[in-house]
Image: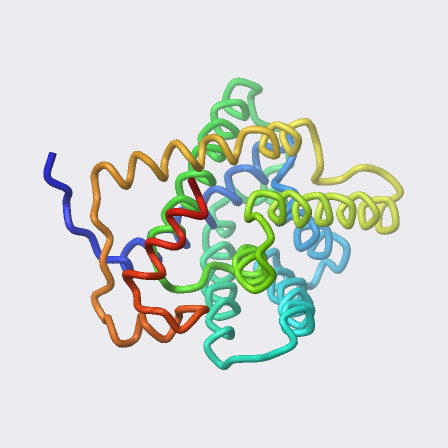
Amino acid sequence: MKKIKASSEVAYLAAIALLSLAVAILTSADFGISMIVAPAYLLSLKTGVLTFGQAEYVIQAGVFIVLCIVLRKFRFVYLFSFVTCLIYGFVLDLWRKIPCFNPTVTEPGSMDLWLRIVMFVVGVILTSFSVALFFKTYIYPQVYDFFVKAVSNKYGIKLSVLKTIVDLTCLTASVIMTFVFFGKIEGIGWGTLVMALLNGTIIGFFSKLLDKIFDFQPTFKKFAAAFDLNGATLTESKNAEEKKNV
C-alpha cells in the first residue's frame, strides 16, 4: 500500500493539541493522571495562583536546567523543547477553560461513573497517540521526553530503560509532593498505574500503525537538519532512531 505523505510540522502541532486535550480529559476523569504531569498539577493545586499550564513552565524549566548539566553542554536549539512546553501549557489552559475539563468548575468525581470511565479510556488512548505523533516529527517534544531522548543519545543508555527511570523519578517526586502539600494522595490514583503499565505498548501500536499509513517528511528540510543531535543527515538520523527502537 502506498503511504500517504504527511508533514512533520503538522504532526507536531497535532501532537501538542491532542496531548493537552488528553491531560485535560484525564484530570476531569479523576482516576489518576500521568506521573509525568503530576508534579505540575500538584504545584498548581497547591499555589492556587499558577494554572496547570503555568506550573508546567516552572517544573520543565527545572528539568531543562538538569538536562544541560547532565549533557554538560547547551545548544540554542535545545530551547525548542521548552518552546514546545510553552505551546503545550498555553493550549492546556485553553482546554481547561471548558467547564467539563476544569475540576474547579466541575468537582472531580461529580460526573456519572460511566462518563468518567469513558473519559479515562479516551484520555489514555489520546495520550499514547499524541506521543506516537511526536516520534514522527523532528521538532523536540516537551522537556520531559527530550531529556530521555538527548541523554539516551549521548550516553548510549537504552531508551526504554531511561524512560522508565524518568517515569519512576516523576512518580516518586509526585508522591512526596502530594504528602508535603496536602498530607494525603491527590492527583495520583489507580489510573496512574494503568497508564504506566499500558502507555508504552499502546504508543508502540500507534507508532507502527502511523508508519504503515503515513510517510512523515519535513516541509522545511534545512530547518529540520538543525535539530539533529549528532549532526548527521536526516536520513541517517531516521535510520539510527528506527534501529534503536527495534
Q: Identify the residue at horizontal 36%, vertical 61% (top origin).
A: 237
**In the image, residue 44 lies at what x, y percent?**
69, 56
Colour scheme shown? rainbow
| Residue 65 against residue 198 in the figure, above or below | below
Q: Pick out the residue farthest to the left.
A: 2
Give 210 or 26, whichever is nearer the viewer.
210
Q: Pick out the residue farthest to the top.
A: 114
Q: Identify the residue at horizontal 31%, vertical 70% (top origin).
A: 224
**In the image, residue 3 lies at what x, y percent?**
15, 42
- Total marks shown come to 0
Can you tell which quarter of the image residue 230 is in?
A: bottom left
Q: Identify the residue at horizontal 11%, vertical 34% (top origin).
A: 1
Say left or right for 225 vs 85.
Answer: left
Can you tell which quarter of the image residue 198 is in?
A: top right
Q: The C terminus lies in which quarter of the figure?
A: top left
**In the image, residue 176 lies at what x, y percent?**
84, 47
| Residue 64 against residue 163 in the figure, above or below | below
Give 57 or 218, whichever is nearer the viewer.
218
Q: Identify the residue at horizontal 51%, vertical 35% (top origin).
A: 200
Say left or right for 174 vs 98.
Answer: right
**In the image, residue 8 lies at what x, y percent?**
28, 58
